[in-house]
Image (spheres, rainbow, N blue to C red):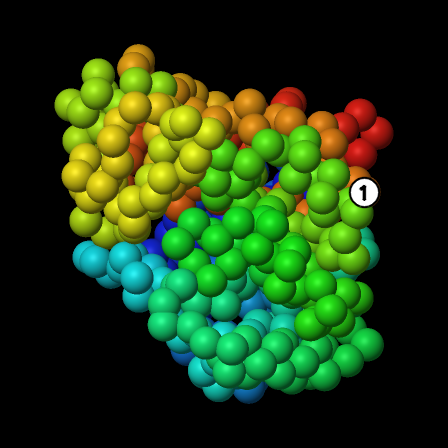
Amino acid sequence: MISYCTNVHPAEDVGGIVAQLERYALPVRERLGADRLGVGLWLSAPVARGLAEDAGARKRFRAELDARGLSVYTLNAFPYGGFHDDVVKHAVYRPEWTNPDRVAYTIDCVNVLSDLLAEDASYGSISTLPLAWREPWTESDDRRAAEAFGEVVRAIGDRPIKLAVEPEPGCVLDTVADALGWLSGRVDPEHVGLCLDTCHLAVSFADPAETLKAIAESDVDIVKVQASAALHVERPAEAREALAAFAEPRYLHQVREFSGGVVRKADDLPEAWTDLPGDGPWRVHFHMPLHQAPAAPLSTTTDVLRTVAAGLPGEPHIEVETYTWSVLPDAGDLVGGIAAELEWAQANLVKEGASA
């Protein structure tokens, strides 16, 4: 099942979430002509806690979803809250996996998803942050984080729920290779695996086919794929004016340059002009709509997404996660944009014979 991630919507209470689903998800489903539409819910920490503590509220929320023909297979528990504040930047990486608040939030999400999970789901997935921003981080933090995952796994028990750790540039688990190295031997592979965000993968300049091979040879499963595309800049010196429209103040837009066989790093787009030489192509952590390319000299990395989709083992959850619609230049109609992305995903990512 392909879902679209509702972290694109700013609601942080149940009433607001239902209103956003009515305003956007329902007309998207109708536009697609689908009986059911997968939605990857983002619940802020207060919403998750309120639902986890109130079985009646979960039942009523499930009824609201069912009434609109919406199915839940996955939650995005990376942002804790405030994901549409005027400035988010590094705040999205807090609380870290060393913080009991992160554990409590994730367990709340487990308890909520257990009651919202679609009847035809073989499992439910919950994506989460790659431990923390890269600094400060110590060996002691490693141990505490591993213990925290163990606590969540014990809370899951025998329920069909899996955590999906999402490597991201600049974090402790910056790349898929980092995530495989950290997860292997530290966590229960039955309940904790990988969230493969294809924008993040592309930004790292890792080869997608080789990455899939490395995952297959590890004891870590792909639990969830976030279908996303990064901004690609072949010749940065010729694209400064075009890139300026994407240097917005809300989210962090990490940049990587590949030149001379080396990946060079900048933590945000404005810093790239001084931190990177501009001798090779850039990839920018800015989630771009899957179905359309920006005007030259910019492009996107949907080729990486296609390669990943073609080589995926099994049928992990696929979630279209373009949360940047509100900060995109000339974003246009959101219902139309989400519907077009899902049509593109259905045509380009679903293997013949696989469930939609």
The answer to which quarter of the image holds residue 117 is: bottom right
| Above-or-below relation of 286 to 43 | above
Would residue 347 be found to the left or right of residue 201 on screen?
right
Residue at 66% of width from left, 64% of height from top? 183
Whole-percent x, y for residue 297 in the image = 29, 15
Task: Compare residues 109 and 30 and report the one nearer the observer.
Answer: 109
| Above-or-below relation of 285 to 296 | below
Whole-percent x, y for residue 225 in the image = 62, 45
Would residue 325 be found to the left or right of residue 198 on screen?
left
* Residue 109 seen by the camera: yes
| Above-or-below relation of 290 to 63 | above
Q: Which residue is mark 1?
A: 314
The answer to which quarter of the image holds residue 165 is: bottom right
Whole-percent x, y for residue 196 in the image = 60, 47
Whole-percent x, y for residue 93 in the image = 39, 65
Task: Compare residues 24 and 206 and report the one nearer the observer.
Answer: 206
* Residue 23 seen by the camera: no
> How many numbered discs?
1
Secondary structure under tag 1 reads: loop
| Callout 1 amino acid | Gly
The answer to which quarter of the image holds residue 12 is: bottom left
Task: Compare residues 224 and 25 and report the one nearer the observer.
Answer: 224
Residue at 23% of width from left, 52% of height from top? 250
Residue at 22% of width from left, 28% of height from top? 243
Residue at 21% of width from left, 58% of height from top? 87
